[in-house]
Amino acid sequence: MEKWIDDQFNEQVLKEAANRFGAVSTNAKKLGDFENYVFEVHKDSLSYILRLTHSSHRCRQDVLAELEWINFLHENGVNASLVHQSANGELVEELKLSDSSFFVCLFDKAPGDPVKAGDDHFSAPLFEKWGEMIGKMHRVTKNFEPGEARREHWTADDVIDLSNFLDSQKDGMIITGNEMLVNKIKEIPETKERFGLIHSDIHSGNFFFHEGDVHVFDFDDSTYFYYLSDIAIPLYYAVWAKLRNANLEERSAFGSKFYHSFLKGYVRENHLLEEWVEQLPLFLKLRDYALYGVFHKKVDLENGNERERELVREIRGRLLQNELIVDLNYKEIFQAVQAGD
């Protein structure tokens, strides 16, 4: 979280946020603070997830649109954590500060446990369930009709234009490369079958695994974009989590196994065409560009920790060398899955 926002957050803000939903902040457990403040709190002896979003990050309508979609998914059988109304009957409560606000919401705590790349069950059965859940989410979303609140189109994201955050002298090639890629993706038709509201960040840190099922959360990055991006991002982060420091050949060998299993689950729930999946490299590269921008936007890299600087160096190296995180035969894998192999 940016320091100027952190300076506005305190125990009284947290207490008031919890009170709006009939929860208590005593012994609240902090779970995250990168883009939102996220806490585990209690209400009637049960655990819930309280999230506070600063108005510099999202407006109230953005948050409301996200929450309405989550509840639609939940109502239609997707394992997404239910969003609760406040004591005032609102999904979003606003805590006003002197010149800004925090938007507060309360979720069910997802059942199960987090998954790490070193875990035994970080394997084919999990990857299939991961794909199945996302496929179901995409299929269900095709029938979603937003209310007055609506999430933004992907091109509204400020990191789409990297010149906002990068030094044009040092990273001019990266700024130009990103612009060219964005323009290329814009040429893809935005049809109902391939474009809609997506989660946009379903890596293994944003779901729990429980009794053989995946339960997803953290929809903060949801946006109107191509469904392919929700396939590329799990592939990207699974490889990154498992073999971040390995060479391209090793990354690709694991990526091929992951993608095969993931796709088997996905196509059980949603339709894909071969010509679509061959465009996945565009979305893998876009994730590198986006992460590079986010690190420069959110992190003080000069004074930050060495791990963050190392991650940024790795991404920068791939972008300058025009190397993807994986190099797969997408057509071959797709055909094998379609054939039942």
Image (spheres, rainbow, N blue to C red):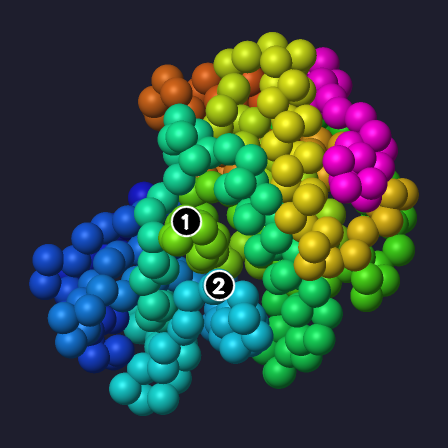
Above or below for 235 versus 18: above
Which residue is identified by label 2?
79
Q: Position of residue 47 (x, y in %)?
A: 22, 64
Using residue 329 as the reference point, say whether residue 162 is left or right of it: left
Res. 77 in view: yes
The residue depicted at 69 percent of the width and 43 percent of the height is 263
* In-front residue for pair 252/224: 252
Q: CA distance from mark 2 to mark 1?
A: 11 Å
The residue depicted at 87 percent of the width and 43 percent of the height is 274
Residue 234 part of the magenta segment = no
Q: Position of residue 283 (x, y in %)?
A: 72, 39
Crowd class of label 2 (few under 14; some 14 to 19; many from 20; radius 10 Å): many
Residue 82's label in the rendered image is: none
| Amino acid, disc 1 | Phe
Residue 209's label in the rendered image is: 1
The residue depicted at 63 percent of the width and 41 percent of the height is 262
Quarter of the image that includes the C terminus = top right
In which quadrant of the rendered view does residue 147 lie?
Answer: bottom right
The residue depicted at 31 percent of the width and 73 percent of the height is 95
Res. 99 in view: no
Q: Secondary structure at mark 1?
A: strand
Magenta-highlighted residues: 316-341
Using residue 110 as the reference point, say whether residue 138 is left or right of it: right
Above or below for 195 versus 120: below
Callout count: 2
